[in-house]
Amino acid sequence: MDYDLAVVGAGICGLAHALAAVRRGLRVAVFDRDAQANGASIRNFGFITVTGQQQGECWNRARRSRDIWSEIAPEAGIEVIQRGLLVAARRPEALAVLEAFATTPMGSECELLGPAGVAERYPMLGPVAGALVSPHELRVESRDAIPRLARWLAEAHGVTFHYGTSVIAADGAGVETSRGRFGAGAVVVCPGDDFGTLLPHRLADYGLTRCKLHMMRLGAPAEPLPIPVMSDLGLVRYLGYAELPEARALEQRLQAEQGNHLANGVHLIAVAGADGSLVVGDSHHYAATPDPFAPGYVDELILDEFRAVLPGYANLPVIERWTGTYASASDRLALVDQAAERLRLVLITSGTGASTSFAIAEEVIADLFG
């Protein structure tokens, strides 16, 4: 046997399983067909989101994953660029959602602000009915954090990385690859949104599809963005808010006033980069095979909300644009399939890989190794 654990996929989900395994003293190898992580794990906000995740399992996983990020970031040389979250309520209906959220266990340690409090502490915001401030979030730069995490796992924990190596079959005793067979005591397959290469018969019953998103990087403002920002549109998308009864009135008003935003799955997240630039998004379009095109009007919908929430930053130039895709399912936020006794298939099906993968990986490795 070459390794105790073979992990297929070097995105955040695969790296999380490698971390959970080496923390138990296991010998781990990670296989990826690309030369480096190039998918959803680096095409996102790097925003480890706790507040707003669905109540229960997802919220608990997000809190645990946030704690693990906090533990490993200094060791791996990963900079935590921002902390916390500001949810701006542009409408009274949005404020009602935030007020209801603040009374739940998920609202613990969050602070509600009225218009005067917002104007005093966050003058970069436009007119609002109020806001919620959460202390729970972390923001890293994904395109930097993921390779640093992989490098640290290799150098500090002895994880072997086989990049540029296609895995063509996997079972509970190892993997067949383009470079031969490698034996393992257990195998975890983290295929991202590739549903057809490995174990397609196991994935076929889950009704999976893909979600395409648009994101942009804007130039650095003269006054830095002090905290990540979300707004009303996120309150009908993030289930921790959207499942509250108060969200129904907000959704009705948004349908009347910003129906095109909702139809394109647009909501606002704006975060700062280490260089002061802003990462802004995003949108959501679903298809079995999303097309490769990025219509300009979708970006304009995102920027429309950004400019309304942060009018002082309205003239910042767009200096970079990209799209990403991730696995999506209508009935679950994550998928853990026991394909065989020592073989697990793990997908994050909600775009919450950075926020929940570490906790999910701990659960999977505990199940496999006791």
Image (cartoon, rainbow, N blue to C red):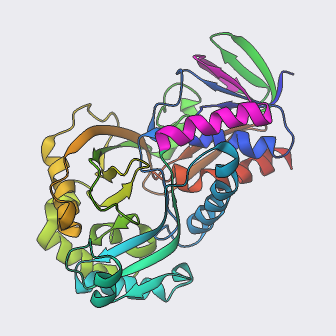
* 156 part of magenta stretch: yes
**Which residue is at 26% across, 73% downward?**
125
Specify the farthest residue to the front: 222
| Residue 147, x across and y down, in percent | 57, 34
Instruction: Tell me what residue is drawn at x 65 percent, y 58 percent.
Output: 70
Near-viewer residue (81 or 30): 81
Vertical comparison of 329 with 157: above or below = below
* Residue 219 left/right relative to 167: left
Q: Where is the N terminus found, in terms of image quarters?
A: top right
Q: Is residue 32 visible?
A: yes
Q: Nearer the viewer, residue 47 or 284?
A: 47
Taking 84 as reference, is 181 left or right? right
* Residue 131 figure quarter: bottom left
Indicate the position of residue 16 as horizontal and vertical percent values.
66, 44
Quarter of the image for residue 100 reads bottom left
**Picture quarter containing residue 248?**
bottom left
Magenta stretch encompasses residue 236: no
**Left or right of residue 149: residue 342:** right
In this view of the protein, can residue 11 be seen by the observer? no
Image spot of residue 18 (x, y percent): 71, 39
* The magenta segment: 142-170
Residue 100 sits above or below residue 106 on the image: below
Query: Which residue does the image show at 80% across and 41% down from the upper left?
Result: 22
Vertical relation: 258 (above or below) 222: below
